[in-house]
Image (cartoon, helix red, strand yellow):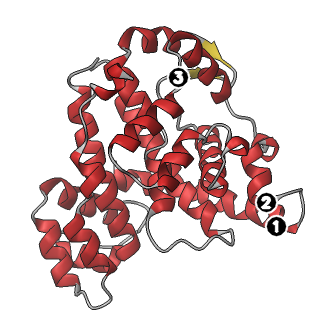
Amino acid sequence: MRRINACPKLASLQSINRALGELVRSEGSLNSQIAEVIRRDPSLSARLLRMVNSVYFGLSTRVNNIEEAVFFLGLRQIRELSMATPVIEELEQLQQTTARSLPWKDLWTHSISTAILTREILASTTLHIDDDTDYLVGLLHNVGKVVMAYSFPDELRAIMATPVANPAAVCILERERIGWDHARIGAHYLVRHQLSEEIVTAVNYHNDPDRAPRHRLFAAAVQVADHLVRHAGVSGGFELIDPVETDSWLALDGWKILYGADGDESRLARASIANSLHRLPAMLQGLL
């Protein structure tokens, strides 16, 4: 706990672009107002234009105007960009104090992919979400690995060098070498940042959602999304995990929590997920 507590805090986890967040949640906001806030952040502006000009949108002409980009993207994706950009930037700064040779871009790609799919998975359930918790639980589920790189670099390198069958086996290795796995480390770190109980609990139990005392749907969605992203070839970046076989996610506790037995709900979810996985590469091209 002393080592984890020594890891620098991330200002973005507490603020996450408050000005932009309030603006995009207001029904009365104009695209011009949102564009003006975005223009103050060069990194966010660059990501916004890169995303709107990606293959995902398939526009016939290139967009170079922030206000036009806001119009094409829509408020939901503006919010996602505004959350992901400051978190990734600060994590990249933190990585400079740790081993630069670690596959950081793979970690960011995996985190954003998991955030996108977690949101889409939860949208297919009866859970009512009126904020961005569904995106944030996916985005932050592996923040414990960043803390490990800072606080336990030697142990992390030993774990990275050990081939394993699945994420559960990674957690066992982490507990053997460190005492806590990356999920618990991440949850402890996020408590220090005063994030919501839903986010902390989902991060803590994303590899074992059946044990979550509360907010099991969030933890379950992250587990399934993490599995699907790995199947799509977007690894977590830090481990040597065996490839994920097609439909193996149907055996996960998270899938059973979300959709129950293999009935109509499960079949509809499988069709929706297949469509999401097909669109994922194009969506990522604009975000990273």
Residue 257 seen anywhere in this rendered image of the structure: yes
Q: Which residue lies at the image location 64% right of the left edge and 44% below the top edge?
A: 223
Indicate the amino acid at tag 2: Tyr
* Count of labels in the image: 3
How far is mark 2 from mark 3, CA to CA? 30 Å
How far across and down, in percent of the image, does residue 60 sit? 34, 73
Give above or below for 164 relative to 42.
Answer: above
Give above or below for 79 relative to 152.
Answer: below
**Pair 2/3: label in front:** 3
Closest to the observer, 52 or 198: 198
How far is mark 1 from mark 2, CA to CA? 6 Å
Indicate the amino acid at tag 3: Trp
Q: Residue furthest bottom?
A: 28
Q: Which residue lies at the image location 26% right of the left edge and 27% below the top edge?
A: 95
Is the residue marked by circle 2 packed among few (<14), some (14-19), or many (20+) residues within 10 Å?
some
Indicate the amino acid at tag 1: Glu
Task: Please give the residue where the numbered disc 2 appears in the rendered image.
Answer: 259
How far across and down, in percent of the image, does residue 55 sit? 41, 60
Task: Please give the residue where the numbered disc 3 appears in the rendered image.
Answer: 180
Figure quadrant of residue 93: top left
Is the residue marked by circle 1 packed among few (<14), some (14-19), or many (20+) residues within 10 Å?
some
Q: Which residue lies at the image location 76% right of the left edge and 42% below the top edge?
A: 252
